[in-house]
Amino acid sequence: MKRIAILGSTGSIGQSTLSVVESYPDRFQVATLAAGNNTDAVFEQTVRWKPRVVSVAQEADAAALRTKLRNAGLGEIEVVNGAAGTVRVATHSEVDFVVSAIVGVSGLEATYEAVKAGKSVGLANKECLVVAGELMTAEARRQGKPLLPIDSEHNAVHQCLRGGRMEEVERIWLTASGGPFLKTPKSEFASITVQQALNHPTWKMGKRITIDSATLMNKGFEVIEACRLFHLPPSHVQVIVHPQSTIHSMVEFVDGSILAQFSVTDMRLPILYALTYPERVPSDLRFPVMDLRHLDFCPPDMSKFPCLGLAYEAAQAGGAKTIALNAADEVAVAAFLAEQIGFEEIPRIIADVMAATPAGKLESIKKVLQLDGEARRLAGEMVNQRNRSASPVRAIP
């Protein structure tokens, strides 16, 4: 029986993980849960799964949840809150496996502490590897425990790599749908609206990740993740546009052989793979191979989508550059969604923040979070400047 902690239990990945647990009651048990502000959902999950510990964001919500659980006859369940509460959930002595699915850097500290505590970790949080991948993977190697990707592209790479040794890998191919503006001329980018950018042709996702897909920044983040997870230089990770999104990733070996992974587009499958690795267990998640008709591929247009080039630049430099990339992107995307800046301003703000951020070396998660805050402040000032604010822009020291 594998005992699981879920960080971000009320989100889509968290709910899919609970669905997998429900399908395999003889294999998995929910040990601890961490959620945000959706107290109704986490109460229902706590009543259903009866974890040892549950964490929520705010102290007031924790107090209210304790009262509701006592009234439901579950007063023995420990309720904690905040960053310290999430760390408690991730490092609990009864936890064997941690699913890291909290969106943003708020899940970073708990995920790192889980790795440090010797837990096996399934990563569905991009920011952990983008902003602190060097620290995260180094600690995982020290602990001798795997970091197993749940993100579908990297999960696909992980599966393909079982067909050969790392020293036999020539390159990794990450597929991209191309987003809603794949065929839009660059001359029209200045007039792109928020509604147009949110109209992704393939996936229904949160607003930030949808805009990141439109700029190809999401694929840039995946390049950085791949470099960190599989210990490859950026030159060995290549993006290819594949509008059908049928093939999730490919691995090319030195002899010219290429292994591709495709499967049903259901996050339960990569979650199940991570939870059961190195086993494969039977499931009913089947891809309709007979429906497969054609597959299209083309290289990404780096001039139309400069965010992808910025991500490669950050991956090559490492250190604080990847922190600046992520923080500036989040601020710039939020400003675009609020119609404070245009679509073309997103990569410009990111480039300016990266240029003002020394690469440096990351010594600790505390330093990562400090640099993240400074990069966000700088990006915010740049957004204000573009709105004719008088606020001066100061480089990160």
Image (cartoon, grey):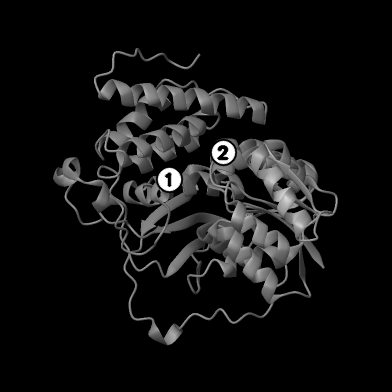
Rendered location of residue 59, percent (x, y)? 67, 38
Report the residue at 53% width, 32% height from top. 318
Residue 18: tell me if it is visible.
Answer: yes
Which amino acid is tagged 2? Val
- Rendered image quadrant of residue 13: bottom right
Q: Which mark is residue 374?
A: none
- Rendered image quadrant of residue 352: top left
Q: Point out the frontmost of discs 2 and 1.
A: 2
Rendered location of residue 147, percent (x, y)? 67, 51
Report the residue at 65% width, 70% height from top. 20
Which amino acid is tagged 1? Gly
- Would you place residue 65 above or below residue 175 in this image? above
Q: Which mark is residue 105?
A: 2
Q: Who is closer to the viewer here, 268 or 222? A: 268
Q: Who is closer to the viewer here, 319 or 86? A: 86
- Secondary structure, mark 2, is helix
Q: Which residue is mark 1?
A: 220
- Would you place residue 378 above or below residue 148 in this image? above
Residue lying at the far bottom in this picture: please name it: 290
Q: Earlier in the sequence, mark 2 or mark 1?
A: 2
Q: Residues within 10 Å of mark 1 (few under 14, many from 20)?
A: many
Residue 54: tell me if it is visible.
Answer: no
- Secondary structure, mark 1, is helix
Q: Who is closer to the viewer here, 184 or 366? A: 366
Image side of residue 276 versus residue 317, left or right: right
Report the residue at 32% width, 57% height from top. 178
Rendered location of residue 172, percent (x, y)? 50, 56
Residue lying at the far left in this picture: please name it: 187
Residue lying at the far front in this picture: please name it: 71
Q: Who is closer to the viewer here, 97 or 81? A: 81
Image side of residue 43 versus residue 94, left or right: left
Per the model, the C-alpha gap separating discs 2 and 1 is: 17 Å
